[in-house]
Amino acid sequence: MGSLDLLLDGFASALSAQNLLFAVIGVLLGTLVGVLPGIGPAMTVALLLPITFTVPPAAALIMFAGIYYGGMYGGSTTSILLNTPGESASIVTALEGNKMARAGRGAQALATAALGSFVAGTIGTLLLSLVAVPVATWASSLTSADYFALTALAFCTVAAMLGTSPLRGVASLSVGLYLGLVGIDKITGQSRFAMGIDELNRGVPVVIAAVGLFAVGESIYVASRLRHGPVNVIPVGTTWGLPKADLKRSWKPWLRGTFIGFPIGAVPAGGADVTTFLSYATEKKLAGKNNEFGKGAIEGVAGPEAANNAAAAGVLVPLLTLGLPTSATAAVMLAAFTSYGIQPGPLLFDTKPELVWALIASLYLGNVLLLVLNLPLAGIWVKLLRVPRPYLYGGILLCASLGAFASSQSAAGLLVLVVIGALGFAMRRYGWPVAPAVLGLILGPVAEENLRKALQISQGDPGALVSSTFSKVMFALALLAVIVPLILRARRRRS
């Protein structure tokens, strides 16, 4: 059966009443968390993980994908009207979008963001449909040494590119790798780092750890820095739509942003943040000297928002075909896969084709749903910005606690949640990025397993780790991912 037939079967599954309902719930929640500052899709997916175990895997993953896409859409609303990005990938949108809103063009800024997100998300999903199977077929030929090299590249790029410094990224990654080693060694049967606690012999629960680091740690951190007083939101005009002049200026940045965002999003640690800055810089350079950049240029909203959503589709390529997450939300989604006993990778398209293609088909539907929600309902999303923050974060902590207890069925789960939540707060407080820790926790055991397999096959010869051209290239890229940021940082300090 060809990819087109499988995609049509995926649409049939995604359009079923249950899956369509979960897609609607996902895009609604995603837009909501994108609008509200300090929450984000990664925290929301982590928060919902424990309470979706009774839901069929396809429905839960469709909902999580809707949250991911919706968070990318919704982040523009806060950036434009409040000058406070709801998502880190929406930081660039605030540069020009907020200035447009202050000039009375907030509706046009929101419209070009929503339409650009729709165009980029749809094209990105189409590219995902085209490249996923060839990449999975190629990945099936990789050896254990190749997979270890891939995980090493993911570790180095995430640690180096996320956070305020590469050293803090490496420190955060080390925390995650340590947590991933806790429990019974699968080969020797020996207990590792359990400290005599029986519950830890089963390992640190990935779901509870994700909830603790994202939902508990980040919500306490954001809540501890809330400003008192009213939230000043710029009102949105009643005139909607995009005038011909603005449409003429927007469509090229939409396409450029799409083809910048998708390939970079598919690279380990590329993510959406990098693509938005590249898109903004590209549009500013192409605009020439006589431009509106710095005063409210619509190109500075259209390009980055398109790049943002195209990167979201690109991130799913390595996640589904290689089992490698390249963003914080993708790392939590990988935890969702593993919690259902599903291992993303090259065999996923053979063992679970109905699930994968239903998920991809739901992305097409989600883009349509998000466009319908974001254009006419922007006024309602704006009102959500006025929700009292103490109620918001108090509710998040309550849901996190209930979810941890439901996941573990014991008070030990709550204790682990508190400890890891405190660790997550401390990491945020001192500028340690959380995403490398989650990546280390999830991919650490995968890297260890492939390392030990490669060494067993080669009878302990470390040269086997770089025996293929692919593994040599991956290790070289990993080394560059660490060295280049250090060199750039040293140059900035000198200048």
Image (spheres, rainbow, N blue to C red):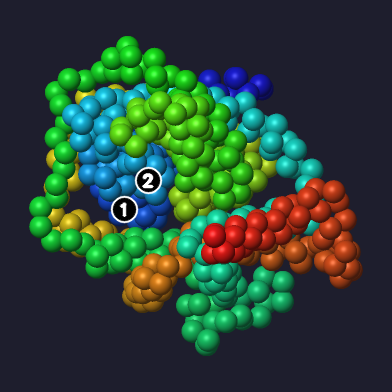
Q: Position of residue 227 (x, y in %)?
A: 18, 61
| Residue in the image at 54% along x and 82% along y | 194
Q: Nearer the viewer, residue 290 or 104?
A: 290
Q: Position of residue 3 (x, y in %)?
A: 63, 23
| Residue in the image at 22% along x and 44% along y | 82
Q: Is residue 430 above or below residue 365?
A: below
Tell me the element at label 2. helix
| 432 left or right of 152 in image | left
Nearer the observer: mark 1 or 2; the answer is 2
Q: Position of residue 239 (x, y in %)?
A: 17, 20
Classify residue 318 by image quadrant.
Answer: top right
Classify residue 280 by image quadrant.
Answer: top left
- What residue did someone put label 2 on? 91
| 377 left or right of 413 in image | left
Q: Is residue 406 above or below residue 197?
A: above
Q: Nearer the viewer, residue 326 or 320?
A: 326
In the rendered structure, which amino acid carries the disc numbered 1?
Ile
Q: Quadrant of the C terminus?
A: bottom right
Q: Name the residue at the top extreme.
A: 244
Does residue 489 appear in this view? no
- What residue did someone put label 1 on? 39
| 68 left or right of 32 in image | right
Tell me the element at label 1. loop
Q: Position of residue 86 (x, y in %)?
A: 31, 47
